[in-house]
Amino acid sequence: METLSHTTSILPLQLPPYPTRPNALSAALSSATSLLHIKQVHAQILRSKFERSDSDSLLFKLILSSCALSPSLDYALSVFDQIPEPKTRFCNKLLRELSRGSEPENALFVYEKMRAEGLSLDRFCFPPLLKAASRNLSLRTGMEIHGLASKLGFGSDPFVETGLIRMYAACRRIMEARLVFDKMSQRDVVTWSIMIDGYCLSGYYDLAFQLFEEMKRTGLEPDEMILSTILSACARAGNLDFGTKIHEFITKKNIVMDPHLQSALIKMYASYGSTDLAWDLYEKISPKNMVISTAMVSGLAKGGQIGDARYVFDQMVEKDLICWSAMISGYTESDCPQEALVLFKKMQQMGMKPDVVTMLSVISACAHLGALDQAKWIQIYVDKNGFGKALSINNALIDMYAKCGSLEGAREIFGKMPKKNVISWTSMINALAMHGDAHNALSLFHQMKVENVEPNWITFVGLLYACSHGGLVKEGQRIFHSMINEYGISPKHEHFGCMVDLFGRAKLLREALEVVEAMPFAPNAIIWGSLMAACQLHSDTELGEFAAKQVLKLEPDHDGALVVLSNIYAKERRWEDAGEVRKLMNEMGVSKERGCSRIELNNEVHEFQMADRKHKQADLIYHKLNEVVQKLKLAGYTPQTNCVLVDLDEEEKKELVLWHSEKLALCYALMNEGSRICITKNLRICEDCHAFMKLASKVYAREIVVRDRTRFHHYRDGSCSCKDYW
């Protein structure tokens, strides 16, 4: 029976005997299941003497069928080559179909062929080409298409202009999109919607709000899609005031709210923390469908109400994939990666199959957890279930492996990728940067340029980050200037923050301050925070105090700034001032983030906090700690108490520093067999723990990897990959 079944599967497609009719061959194409079948039909078409229109129609369908059945365009393009002088209308139809397909770059290949053959292009070919460039994020090709459209006199066609706006917005070239938009003589609701959505996509929410108001002044009524986009922007920007005005506008205009508009409102209120308003809206909706409930789950999760989100999720009678994904994503974004992975496994038990969006959240959760065994399991799952072909999945896997401490795993994924986009290259550059491999990060950037891949602003954040953690001040300055002068990318807060960090780590604190003062826009709390951290590192009390106070002006309850300010005073033994800051923190309900370390052993993630005794083997762990400390002292270890900034005697400080969470995690790992130890820490590793890990790697002949808040430290044979520059 197996032999018969196999034989049947390779039998040729049953075609009517020659000669046949076009309809029969068209039906045969529709039922074709392999490229072999397609070629059989092609042979019949060539043998038949059909009218030109029938022949072209069949060949068109044949090309589309071959594109669907084969990942290679070689055969489809060879058929296209055989069509004598294909009509522009035929080409336009092919471009339109390909631009809508799962691989829009196919339309761009056909375009290149048309250009090489000197085929004429009319105004109808440009919208699908721009759509393909938009979906494929092919900025360079999109700009070439723009130039050609203008040269042929189609640059002012409203459909071409709309396609250009969509392409530039998708490629994050929002200024170019706005230039096209401003030149348009006619704008419909779709055009306004694309431009507003483009601003939101690039994070320019205030400009999106301004454009929305400008649209209303023209007398054009926004549709439900625009209103939903604006409400989502309000949620992301935390602009509840504008969101409330939109709600009032909807009520005043008696706009009938569909589930998507209701969802956008609920999500906005919930994610901003106005849970009472969200609950009020939610309770009034009856019956509650999955779209509404999913929005409530997502909004509550984004607003930090993860428990309430799970309550709504559990109350839902029916759950679709979007709902499961929203809850998994909520856990991931709420720093609950273990819960996200547990829920993912429960989802599978319920018979629900994930999609790419779900998998991206799961991969992100694993990256956040830093568990390498889990990462390997997820990659096996990805490959087994066919997700490995998705570019976005591979990009996420690079980031996951890097954050789980396996630079080798990230390199392997990157090396095997058949297609790479700017995100792929940027992800690998960031992976190298976070592992302190600045020179290879820069080398990869040069290779990226050779491959003619256009870097984006995020690429330069990764490069500057690499230079900062590698102490490459001159190279960092050169890259910063090339970003502006060579690539025309305007620096954002992130770039200036990297430059402040670059100078600050190198103890060039005055140069760091000059960067802050020369910024074309007001520095945010992150910029001042970078300067503040550098001053704390290099004991510049005066400038550090100034920077901390600037942070607190912007964010009065910033726990990091309050802690640093307290630490600055403590280092100077200004105990009274330090006490005042601590008192202020208590009054404001602000507490210092507690150190937490995670380690994965035997497919289980174990979590430790400072002086933690919650672990079921706590007594054994502390016994092991005493043993390790004694061994390391024989190798020259002396506890460094300068990181303990409380008014205690020296012996109490020594005891306190030995109870840091990463030391407990290390000792638990040393109780178990294995060669490589990987610890994930939520804060910057202190000087004492750094020295402790270096000695432990030598004394116990084990590789130790610690991922702290900013980077990875690879300890081998008594030295660290950061070369003590971190």
Image: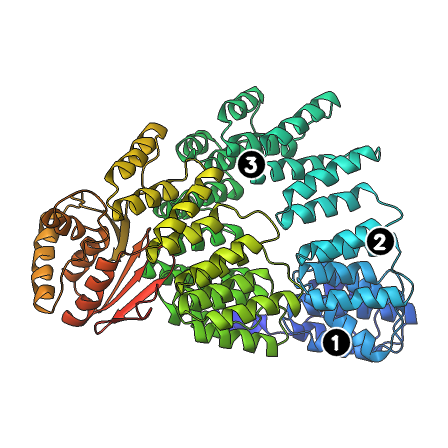
The residue shown at (15%, 45%) is 616
Circle 2 SS class? helix
Q: Are marks 1 and 2 in contact (CB under 8 Å)?
A: no
Residue type marked 3: Gly
Left or right: 27, with 229 as reference point: right
Counting from the top left corner in percent of width and height, residue 493 is at: 55, 53
Which residue has dot 3 on it?
238
Residue type marked 1: Leu
Q: Is residue 83 above or below residue 366?
A: below
Q: How far is mark 1 from mark 3, CA to CA?
A: 50 Å
Front residue of this view, candidates 547 and 429: 547
**Mark 2 packing: few (<14 Cα in 10 Å), some, or many (20+)?**
some
Which of the two labelled residues, at mark 1 and mark 3, occupies the earlier sequence position? 1
Dot in front, 1 or 2 = 2
The residue shown at (66%, 27%) is 245
Front residue of this view, candidates 611 and 481: 481
Residue type marked 2: Phe
**Mark 1 packing: few (<14 Cα in 10 Å), some, or many (20+)?**
some
Which residue has dot 2 on it?
159
Which residue has dot 1 on it?
77
Circle 1 SS class? helix
